[in-house]
Amino acid sequence: MPLLFSYGTLQQENVQRATFGRLLAGRSAELLGYSVSMIAIDDPEVVRTSGKTHHPIVRFTGVRDDRVPGTVFEVTQLELEHSDKYEVAAYKRVLAPLSSGEEAWVYIDARHTP
């Protein structure tokens, strides 16, 4: 099954239920080579679902010592497609390295892709 790394709202139970129709079982993980900041969300449906007008967003730095904590989930391909619909255009899904040595899909700043 594909791995999906979340450092933000996809960790919220209400967002998981709305996006995937279920709660995801996950484990702590760290994303390597990225830094995190915040971005304003202007999509009213995403704001309604998450309850937040600002979401975290990660930017590729390429520095292996830069780490972003979060949660990694096992999801189906169909669930990945559902998460693509939830994320706004500012985010792009890419495969990225975790500190565990695994690679996971993660939504990053679309303006700063590796």
Image (tube, rainbow, N blue to C red):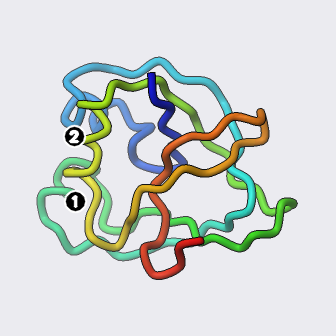
Q: Please state which of residues 76 and 28 is positioned toward the viewer in this rendering.
A: 76
Toward which corner of the image does residue 27 lie, by quadrant?
Answer: top right
Compared with residue 38, is residue 94 higher up or lower down, i.e. above or below? above
Residue ID at (49%, 63%) = 108
Percent position of residue 4, x then y: 48, 37
Q: Earlier in the sequence, mark 2 or mark 1?
A: 1
Dot 2 alpha-carbon crowd within 10 angstroms: few under 14, some 14 to 19, many 20 or more? some
Percent position of residue 51, x then y: 27, 52
Q: The C terminus appears in which quarter of the rendering?
A: bottom right
Q: Is residue 108 left or right of residue 87?
A: right
- Residue on which disc 1 sits: 47
Toward which corner of the image does residue 16 lie, by quadrant?
Answer: top left
Dot 1 alpha-carbon crowd within 10 angstroms: few under 14, some 14 to 19, many 20 or more? some
Label 2 amino acid?
A: His
- Residue on which disc 2 sits: 82
Toward which corner of the image does residue 83 lie, by quadrant?
Answer: top left
Residue ID at (28%, 34%) = 14
Residue most extreme to the right: 65
Percent position of residue 48, x then y: 17, 54
Q: Is residue 66 left or right of residue 43?
A: right
The residues bearing labels 2 and 1 have C-alpha atoms spaced at a distance of 16 Å
Q: Secondary structure at mark 2?
A: helix
